[in-house]
Image (cartoon, rainbow, N blue to C red):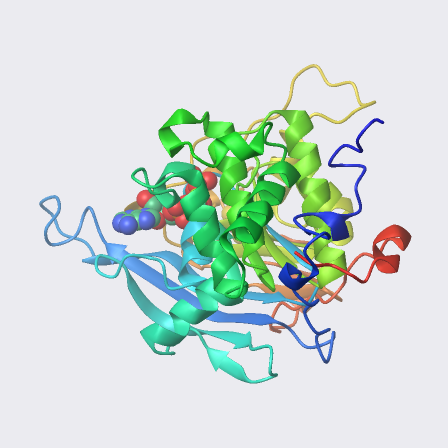
Amino acid sequence: MTQPTDSQRPASEAFAITENPEAVLTTRPAVANENEPLLEVNKLAVSFPSSRGRQGRRGGGPSRVRAVNNVNLRIYPRQTLAVVGESGCGKSVTALSILRLVPMPPGQLESGSILWRHKDGQVMDLATVSDEQIRRIRGDEVAMIFQEPMTSLNPVYTIGEQILEAIYLHQHHLEPQQARDVAIEALDAVGIAAPASRLDEYPHQMSGGMRQRVMIAMALACQPRLLLADEPTTALDVTIQAQILELLRRLQQERHMSVLLITHDLGVVAENADAVAVMYAGRVVEYGSVHEVFNNPLHPYTQGLFGSMPVIGRTRSRLETIPGNVPDPSSFPSGCPFHPRCPKVEGDERCTGQDPPLLEIESGHWAACWHAPGYEAGQQTVPDVSYRRPVEEEASQGATTSV
Ligand SMILES: Nc1ncnc2c1ncn2[C@@H]1O[C@H](COP(=O)(O)OP(=O)(O)OP(=O)(O)O)[C@@H](O)[C@H]1O
Ligand code: SF4
Ligand SMILES: [Mg+2]
């Protein structure tokens, strides 16, 4: 009989070991109020020593610079918030800060709160909870898929030992063979062939793409309520990428898991995200539902990102590019940080002299640009989009997730 492929299986089966009911975890209780954010990042600012500061080049400059500056994000249950932007704009530092994983020093949390709604309904500030509490949150409620697979897999332990550690966090009572079965299911679900034999291999025996999948399996085995996915599929070929994203989507719907999805791929955003934050030079420069931002990008930087993307059915002699690069935090320009690259500056002194705040220009759509249509009448509100795609029929029927 032909076995169903991963993408054909209901997500509720992923990692489940139905023959061992003892080992099956109960489904996470539904979040009491779907309309309350699971995570609120408020005015987050993270700095690093400047390469041009006191210890840097002659001529001085500030000793510390903000790689992330005044970032506000909201993530709701079952929502995917995508964070996009070019290399170096602060996406990873933002995600790492949520779990207090930025090395401090040299990093420093300059300001901000990271409000997390615990499963018992309590709200805690992850920026100030004890080391013990943040460790518990990391293992139990928020998982991260790191951009660099090798940094999070320990080279001296086998893949199996590392996955089992994550599984025992949640299923302390499992017999060794049962836990091993769960680990095999976890690897199988992310498309690793011959998973049983892979358990005894070390990370260096796997390709980069396989290590990435192992990390995804480990993160999901933690049963997180929030998954921080930093470029989770960039090392994978397109078919595995599609399977992984499909698996994430279905698990998300069944378990009400939320995802902070960092990606360069606007196609992945369009297909998977509900809301999107566009970052540039450590700031959020545009924010809204995917529908709003994709149909009506207000910020010249967002427009530039879309201009550099091929569109099926549209003929263009060449794709547009955004001239120049994201500056290093030590060299962020004054005024609007995008002004040296912006096609709309046109000698406007506001652009070169004043950093435009992020304003709500249309209902549920924020942008930080003096020239954005309607900016003058914009409101200074906190970016907050609770929109989620409707739950797919298939996933809503399977309320038996046992991952
Ligand atoms: N530990 C650190 N020490 C000093 N600077 C750092 C450190 N970590 C990050 N930075 C700086 O902070 C800025 C933002 O880095 P970040 O890794 O968040 O970028 P990113 O948007 O994730 O880029 P990419 O798409 O390449 O992953 C960069 O200029 C980077 O050099
Ligand atoms: S404020 Fe000026 S420089 Fe900045 S994005 Fe808008 S038009 Fe461009
Ligand atoms: Mg990064």
Q: Is residue 67 left or right of residue 223?
A: left
Q: From what the image shows, is residue 359 above or below residue 238?
A: below
Q: Identify the residue shown where x is 26% and y is 56%.
A: 48
**228 or 138, which is in the foreground?**
138
Position of 398 compared to 26: left or right?
right
**Relative to the observer, which residue lies in front, 72 or 93?**
93
| Image quarter hosting the C terminus | bottom right
Place of residue 273 in the rendered image (x, y in percent of width and height, measured from the top left):
70, 50
Q: Where is residue 12 in the image (x, y as percent from the top left)?
A: 76, 53
Depth check, front residue: 175 or 285: 175
Image quadrant where one finds the N terminus: top right
Image coords of residue 36 (percent x, y): 68, 77
Total number of numbered discs in the rendering: 0
- On the image, the x and y values in percent for residue 180 come to 53, 47
Residue 84 visible, this angle: no
> To which quarter of the image does residue 222 belong?
bottom right
User: Quarter of the image holding residue 25?
Assistant: bottom right
Q: In this view, does 221 lie to the left or right of 338?
A: right
Q: Quadrant of residue 399?
A: bottom right
Task: State whether residue 132 appears in this view.
Answer: yes
Which residue occupies the extreme top position in the image? 317
Q: In the image shown, does 41 or 216 lie closer to the viewer?
A: 216
Position of residue 354 relative to residue 298, above or below, is below
